[in-house]
Image (spheres, rainbow, N blue to C red):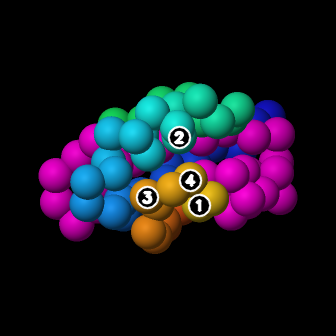
Amino acid sequence: MATTGLVLIHLEAGRERDAIEKIKKIDGVKGVTGVFGSWDAIATVEAKDLETLAGLVVGRLRAVLGVVDTETLIEVKV
């Protein structure tokens, strides 16, 4: 079973569109939505396990120019 997460993303002003387009192209990112509020975008990510998901967020998503900060929420079944 895959591990799914929602990544809340702060983006640098003026780089939102470019950053979101780059995030959408990352393998494991299932979708990205721009939002208003405390965060600028939310990405749905999926990986085979928690360790792989962490590598995706830390190694790939956070490396995108314009990404300032992230918070990852791991999906659980209740």
Q: Between residues 54 and 73, which one lies in front from this camera angle? A: 54
Q: Amino acid at mark 2?
A: Ile
Residue at left 82%, top 51%? 52
| Residue located beneath label 1 in the image | 62
As helix, strand or loop, the secondary structure at mark 1 comes to loop
Say which amino acid is labelled 1. Answer: Arg
* Alpha carbon distance from label 4 to label 2: 7 Å
Q: Are marks 3 and 2 in contact (CB under 8 Å)?
A: no
Task: Categorize mark 4 by other alpha carbons within 10 Å: few (<14), some (14-19), many (20+).
Answer: some
Q: Report the span colored magenta.
A: 34-61
Question: What's the mark number on residue 64?
Answer: 4
Q: Earlier in the sequence, mark 4 or mark 2?
A: 2
**In-image side of 24 versus 68 (left or right):** right
Mark 3–mark 4 CB contact (< 8 Å): yes
Residue annotated with mark 3: 66
Regarding mark 3 in the picture, which secondary structure is present there?
loop
Callout 4–callout 2 Cβ contact below 8 Å: yes
Q: Nearer the viewer, residue 50 or 71?
A: 71
In the rendered structure, which amino acid carries the disc numbered 4?
A: Val
Of the residues under marks 3 and 2, which one precedes in the sequence? Answer: 2
Q: Marks 4 and 2: which is nearer the front?
A: 4
Indicate yes or no whether the magenta region holds residue 47: yes
In the image, residue 24 above or below residue 19? above
Q: Amino acid at mark 3?
A: Gly
| Residue 2 percent across, percent down from the top left | 75, 37
| Numbered mark located on residue 23 in the image | 2
Mark 3 and mark 2: Cα distance apart in space:
10 Å
The image position of residue 4, as x and y in percent, is 63, 43
